[in-house]
């Protein structure tokens, strides 16, 4: 069983290869793999994307669907497991669009990441490199996502940026 940092953040843009890289880290660990899915299916495009991710992961994963309650899902992991949370961006979207208390939910989320018995690898989108959105909801989301990424990165042992499928260590080592 390969040693993993307690918390690893894998950041990247859309279709950058961040999920595939995070899945590879889990697979190479030799640990029992738990996948916490935060996506919800609202249309055919999302259903297709989820099916592609399932096919890409292959077998050998326990999947827990937790669009909002990632904290409870993390309590199911033991010290012989590795947990992949994919992704913080969709979790944040669910919190904001569901009109939940963002500060309370974020505190609970961050606490759970740090108290998990298993190493956690969390995927998140880097959304701050684009143009300033033209509407208030999009700006609120962009700012909240940037803050969430900073909060996770501050607590993470390892932070990896993925671009064009290539990982770059921002904190810690590959």
Image (cartoon, grey):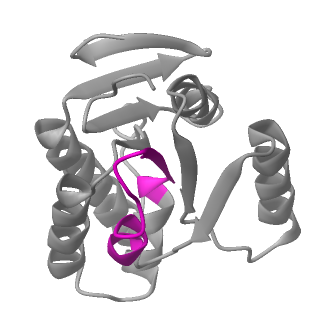
Q: Is residue 146 above or below residue 24?
A: below
Using the image as rendered, state which of residue 104 and residue 37 is in the foreground.
Answer: 37
Q: Is residue 15 above or below residue 54?
A: above
Q: Count the marks.
A: 0
Q: Which image quadrant for residue 123? A: top left
Quick one: quadrant of the C terminus? top left
Residue 108, given in percent of the width and then of the height, sits at: 20, 73
Q: Residue at x 26, y 45 (%)?
A: 149
**Does the magenta-highlighted stretch encompass residue 34?**
no
Q: Which image quadrant for residue 115? A: bottom left
Q: Is residue 161 above or below residue 149?
A: above
Using the image as rendered, state which of residue 51 and residue 120 is in the foreground.
Answer: 120
Q: Which image quadrant for residue 73? A: bottom left
Viewed as shown, does residue 15 lie left or right of 95? right
Q: Is residue 141 above or below residue 19?
A: below
Residue 49, given in percent of the width and then of the height, sits at: 79, 52
Quick one: quadrant of the N terminus? top left
Viewed as shown, does residue 112 lie left or right of 103? right
Viewed as shown, does residue 148 lie left or right of 103? right
Viewed as shown, does residue 156 lie left or right of 59? left
Residue 170, given in percent of the width and then of the height, sits at: 26, 16
Using the image as rendered, state which of residue 100 and residue 123 is in the foreground.
Answer: 123
Q: Residue at x 41, y 32 (%)?
A: 10
**Does the magenta-highlighted stretch encompass residue 82?**
yes
- Which portion, as a residue range, is magenta? 70-89
Q: Residue at x 50, y 27 (%)?
A: 29
Residue 5, given in percent of the width and then of the height, sits at: 27, 29
Q: Residue at x 38, y 56 (%)?
A: 78
């Amino acid at each position: 069983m390969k040693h993993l940092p307690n918390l690893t953040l894998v950041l990247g843009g859309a279709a950058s290869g961040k999920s595939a890289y995070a899945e590879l880290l889990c697979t190479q660990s030799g640990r029992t793999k738990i996948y916490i899915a935060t996506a919800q299916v609202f249309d055919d495009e999302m259903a297709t994307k989820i099916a592609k991710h399932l096919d890409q992961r292959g077998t050998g994963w326990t999947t827990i669907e937790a669009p909002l309650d990632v904290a409870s899902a993390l309590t199911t992991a033991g010290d012989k497991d590795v947990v992949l949370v994919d992704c913080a961006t969709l979790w944040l979207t669910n919190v904001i669009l569901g009109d939940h208390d963002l500060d309370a939910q974020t505190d609970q989320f961050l606490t759970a990441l740090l108290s998990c018995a298993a190493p956690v690898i969390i995927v998140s989108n880097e959304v701050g490199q684009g143009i300033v959105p033209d509407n208030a909801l999009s700006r609120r989301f962009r700012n909240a996502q940037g803050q969430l990424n900073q909060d996770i990165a501050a607590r993470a042992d390892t932070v990896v940026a993925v671009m064009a499928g290539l990982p770059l260590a921002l904190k810690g080592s590959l």
